[in-house]
């Protein structure tokens, strides 16, 4: 559910016509709905009602400062995967005590920065990383709070690129090693073992993988308790899927699969939702440049491309594409919606049934809030889009469109001899 709706044939974000935003800021532009962000955060938080818990929004899904600030104001913590995200969260007003640090490749500099900031815990993914954190903590005269991230060896039933809980994935500590790693951690004075964590994948739309992960987490916690470990936190990761096309996953099923079974452990549950909070809260506004007909296909060429939204190219992801102004006379046609980039993989939709637009029409690529702008690049020397937040009848440019000048910042012209 979201607050992008048609009123008299015109698509609005809450109370603001998208056409008005496009006229003011130009396109391509990402537009987020504050009411949708708030609602999704509250609904997800509600799943944990009655259980000690902390929601740590997965910063990497949408890391615009104003979005992070809104979540911080709503009491959210944050899951970060780099020092850049740490800095963003702190600048947005996050409490360091509500930040968890995930990822397989934390550098010593990143570990030191997070320790100095005073984060809640590091989710550790390997033995060498455990030693690195211990060493950095010791050199700073600190104790690092850690949790080990287990790879529960299951099939999350999602796209291979976003599946992290499989036995062969680079993520987490294998089940067969996890208890031994805890024993190693216990021997290191500069570490404080506070939790157990996992994250099995993304865009999961069935209960089974969560139920299986929950069962494995319970088993590990009980074994750790038998060995005298007293954990405070159990971090379930993120991964809850959303509706892009016709998929459907009820949060009540998520609650039954993993939250309810884990509550008996009487630990503070941490969740790291990203997509489920922000995915449907954003659209990418783009304009039709040309309608190109060949003898075999029809292409709608638009002014945004895989550098602005890479999910279709990278994951074969489906994004609904809606006209910003409905045209009663437009026939339904099948077309590819493609960008100007010089790659055949540059498309936003393939063989899509949609009302035939005309050059100059605006389109909204729906469900673009998560892993949208954050994955944008400058490929083909294209400036990245602007970002706008709508709140009721107000709207704010929360990130200016990049300029061509921005693209060359930091570059130095060196005259190399042509010989
Ligand atoms: C990406 C990620 C998340 C968020 O995943 P979603 O599918 O967006 O909910 C949570 N935790 C970790 C460790 C991640 O890497």
Image: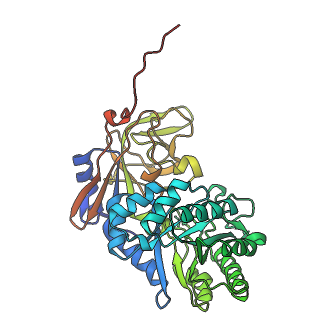
At horizontal 67% and vertical 83% (from top left) the residue drawn is: 221
Q: Looking at the image, is 22 positioned above or below residue 73?
A: above
At horizontal 38% and vertical 34% (from top left) the residue drawn is: 410
**Number of marks drawn:** 0
Q: Is residue 11 visible?
A: no
Drawn side of residue 257 relative to residue 382, left or right: right
Q: Name the residue at the right extreme.
A: 176
Q: Name the residue at the top extreme.
A: 419
Quadrant position of the N terminus in the picture = bottom left
Residue 50 pos. (x, y %): 47, 91
Q: Nearer the viewer, residue 360 or 260?
A: 260
**Looking at the image, in which quadrant does ligand 1 appear?**
bottom right
Residue 130 pos. (x, y %): 64, 64
Q: Is residue 175 visible?
A: yes
At horizontal 34% and vertical 76% (from top left) the residue drawn is: 74
Drawn side of residue 400 relative to residue 126, left or right: left
Residue 323 pos. (x, y %): 36, 52
At horizontal 64% and vertical 68% (from top left) the residue drawn is: 200
Residue 106 pos. (x, y %): 57, 57
Q: Nearer the viewer, residue 67 or 112?
A: 112
Q: Looking at the image, is 235 positioned above or below residue 165?
A: below
Identify the coloring: rainbow
């Amino acid at each position: 559910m979201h607050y992008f709706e048609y009123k008299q044939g015109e698509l609005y974000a809450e109370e603001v016509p998208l056409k008005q935003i496009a006229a003011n800021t130009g396109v391509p532009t990402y537009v987020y709905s504050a009411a949708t962000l708030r609602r999704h955060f509250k609904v997800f938080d509600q799943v944990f009602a009655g259980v000690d818990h902390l929601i740590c929004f997965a910063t990497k899904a949408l890391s615009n400062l104003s979005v992070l600030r809104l979540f911080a104001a709503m009491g959210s913590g944050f899951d970060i995967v780099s020092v850049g995200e740490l800095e963003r969260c702190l600048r947005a007003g996050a409490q360091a005590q509500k930040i968890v640090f995930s990822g397989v490749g934390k550098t010593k500099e990143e570990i030191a920065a997070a320790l100095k900031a005073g984060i809640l815990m590091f989710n550790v993914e390997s033995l060498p990383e455990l030693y690195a954190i211990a060493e950095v903590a010791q050199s700073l005269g600190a104790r690092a709070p850690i949790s080990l991230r287990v790879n529960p060896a299951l099939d999350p039933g999602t796209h291979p690129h976003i599946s992290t809980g499989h036995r062969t994935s680079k993520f987490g500590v294998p089940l067969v090693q996890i208890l031994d790693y805890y024993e190693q951690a216990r021997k290191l004075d500069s570490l404080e073992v506070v939790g157990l964590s996992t994250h099995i994948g993304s865009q999961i739309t069935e209960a089974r993988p969560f139920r299986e992960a929950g069962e494995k987490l319970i088993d590990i916690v009980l074994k750790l308790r038998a060995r005298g470990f007293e954990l405070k936190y159990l971090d379930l990761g993120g991964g809850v899927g959303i509706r892009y096309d016709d998929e459907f996953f009820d949060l009540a099923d998520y609650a039954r699969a993993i939250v309810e079974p884990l509550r008996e452990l009487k630990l503070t549950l941490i969740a790291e939702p990203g997509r489920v909070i922000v995915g449907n809260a954003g659209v990418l506004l783009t304009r039709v440049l040309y309608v190109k007909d060949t003898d075999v296909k029809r292409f709608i060429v638009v002014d945004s491309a895989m550098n602005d939204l890479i999910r279709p190219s990278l994951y074969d992801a489906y994004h609904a594409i809606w006209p910003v102004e409905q045209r009663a006379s437009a026939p339904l046609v099948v077309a590819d919606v493609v960008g100007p980039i010089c790659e055949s993989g540059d498309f936003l939709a393939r063989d899509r049934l949609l009302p035939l637009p005309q050059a100059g029409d605006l389109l909204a690529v729906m469900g673009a809030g998560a892993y949208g702008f954050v994955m944008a690049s400058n490929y083909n020397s294209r400036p990245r889009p602007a970002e706008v937040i709508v709140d009721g009848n107000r709207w704010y440019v929360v990130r200016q469109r990049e300029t061509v000048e921005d693209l060359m910042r930091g570059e130095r012209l060196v005259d190399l001899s042509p010989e």
